[in-house]
Image (cartoon, rainbow, N blue to C red):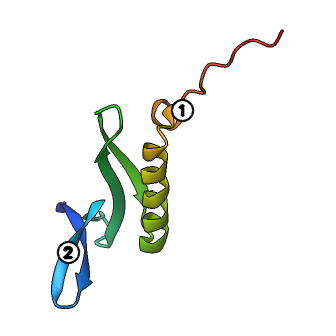
Amino acid sequence: MQETFERVTERHGKVEVPVKHFYRTTYQTRGGNWSTVFYARFKDWKGQQRMFPLGSNLEMARETLTIYEARNIRREISTWTGKRPNRSPSA
């Protein structure tokens, strides 16, 4: 199977400009069909390299990328670790 991993680009006039943090992988399945999956790839506010699958629909992937970028700016830890933040016990 052949697989590619590349940046997503947008056309601005006659120039192709890469979209920041937005990647796609294209691969051929056993049945001969081609599939595309989009990914967000960036360094989070802690300095760790992160990569999140965004799905196979281009428009939904763009929206989800925007959400991940906003969560990174707000420094939401629970999104990165998969754990809920510690809460103080109720008295």
Which corner quadrant of the image does residue 8 belong to? bottom left
Viewer-closest of 65 and 76 = 76
Instruction: Please report the residue visible at 55 percent of the width from the left and 27 percent of the height from the top.
Output: 83
User: Which residue is depicted at the point 29% across and 33% down?
Assistant: 48
| Whether residue 73 is situated above or below residue 20 in the rendered picture | above
> Horizontal placement of 47 versus 91: left or right?
left
Secondary structure of the residue carrying tag 2 is strand
Q: Label 1: how many residues lie within 10 Å, few (<14), some (14-19) or many (20+)?
A: few
Outermost residue, bottom direction? 13
Q: Residue furthest top?
A: 91
Q: Amino acid at mark 2?
A: Val
- The residues tagged by marks 1 and 2 sit, at their Cα atoms, a distance apart of 33 Å
Which residue is nearer to you in this view: 69 or 80?
A: 69
Report if the CB atoms under discs 1 and 2 are less than 8 Å apart.
no
Q: Quadrant of the N terminus?
A: bottom left
The percent coordinates of residue 80 (x first, y second) are 45, 35
- In the image, 49: left or right of 15? right
- Picture quadrant of residue 19: bottom left
Q: Secondary structure at mark 1?
A: helix
Q: Is residue 11 left or right of residue 39?
A: left
Residue nearer the viewer, 45 or 80? 45
Q: Relative to 84, say whether 74 is above or below.
A: below
Q: Which mark is residue 78?
A: 1
Mark sitting on residue 17 = 2
x and y, in percent, of residue 81 in the image: 47, 30
**Residue 41 placement (x, y as % from top left):** 30, 50
Q: Residue most toward the front?
A: 74
Q: Amino acid at mark 1?
A: Ser
